[in-house]
Image (cartoon, grey):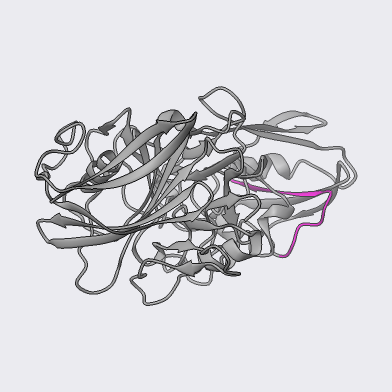
Amino acid sequence: MTTGVIVRQRCGRVRAVLTVLLAAGALAGGGVAGGSAAVSADVLRTGRTAPAASGVTYTQFSMAVPRGIARGHLLTVDLARPDVSVDLLYAGAVGARKAVSAMADAQDAVAGVNGDFFNITEDQHPGVEPTGASDGPAIASGRRLKSAVPDGQRFGPPLPPGTTAEDVIAVGPDRRVRLDRLSLQGSVATPDGRLPLRGLNLYALPVDGIGAYTPEWGTTSRVRATCGTDADRAAPCSEDTTEVTVRGGRVEKVADTPGRGGVPEGTTVLVGREEGARQLRKLSVGERVRVTDRLVGQRPGPARFAVGGFPVLRDGAPLPGLDTVASAVRTAAGVGGDGRVLYLLALDGTKGNAGLTIDELAGLMTRIGARDALNLDGGGSSTLVLREPGSGAATVRNHPSGGAERPVPNGIGVFARGL
């Protein structure tokens, strides 16, 4: 038996239809492009398929791989419908974590999956508080929350060739979902000139850099921002640091070490390391300082939503150099229907369920209909939640590998007005 995902155009709307084909034969498009691991035509099967909300379809599936059966869960989201939208789920602060179901309920989302990889532990820096903050850029409802850490400071598996921590899945002003790359552009204007801003609400600043921390950062310690180097996350913490508190456009306080605690509205905390610290130490209490920042993408139009991960599929072809060895529980987001269809996928993590390699994941995303796809955090973080029509709460539909939801910093939420 062969299973395929067919996207049909009806009455001006993209409607996702999962169809079980009773006769043997290849899926649309045949084998997986780009040299991805060969998968026979009868390995992908669907189980329960049901409309979950206006414009949202939920499907269970299984996929045979050399190690056994990978079981998973898929949300197909029709963004051509004006009453359906996507936005960031997050825990209320960059340096905070919550379960995906709790974030979905708090933001009244009908469905969602976990998002970016994040700073979960600090075993390599004893005594330094892990922040819980994510690797890549994040934008919620058009509001910039954070930029990307240096590639060498990332948590998560190695990046495929040609990708970076700045890679995101995003939605632009045209309401189309897309892969993009968001870089930080900003400065710190002082009486002596302009200093480059190298980070926004980051758990890891570039060496010699200056980072800005806003109320969106939360209450967690900022010490981790000065640990490691651009190439080595485990390198010691810098001993040359400065923190400057700017309130109402003037320097309010200068300290030698990064602090913790919430950043009040109207206040920005600047943290510098090495050369950045030396430049900040030149500032005096009462001096005027102006901090500017923006996240700039490679695609036209500002992003209204964005979350980090790394691309595995572009223009229908898996990226070259994808890992073919390491198998794990995966979460992914895919783009189809000229940006009007979003696929959200999470695997089961219970004993007896096989995981997928990154290469196999790219092949699977191609088969379900995606032209572009992003790998999100996996393992114990992989979570897909859904709120049934008439229900007041979202429930977990996959089986997390830890036996329960892991608190995570962010996710992708699906919203349907009028539900």
Q: Is residue 239 visible?
A: no
Residue 192 x %, y %? 79, 29
Residue 147 x %, y %? 57, 42
Q: Which sits in the foreground, 19 or 299?
A: 19
Asked where in the image residue 264 lies, by quadrant, the reply is bottom right
Residue at the image point whose x is 56% and y is 22% from the top: 300
Residue at the image point whose x is 84% and y is 48% from the top: 266
Instruction: Based on the picture, tell me whether residue 272 belongs to the magenta stretch.
Output: yes
Is residue 244 placed above or below 32 in the rendered structure?
A: below
Q: Give the range drawn in magenta.
A: 261-273
Instruction: Based on the picture, tell me whether residue 66 belongs to the magenta stretch.
Output: no
Residue 23 x %, y %? 11, 45
Residue at the image point whose x is 58% and y is 41% from the top: 305
Q: Which sits in the foreground, 176 or 51?
A: 51
Residue 156 x %, y %? 37, 54
106 relative to 163 in the view: left or right: right
Q: Can residue 133 be seen in this view?
A: yes
Q: Please identify the quadrant where the C terminus is shown.
A: bottom right
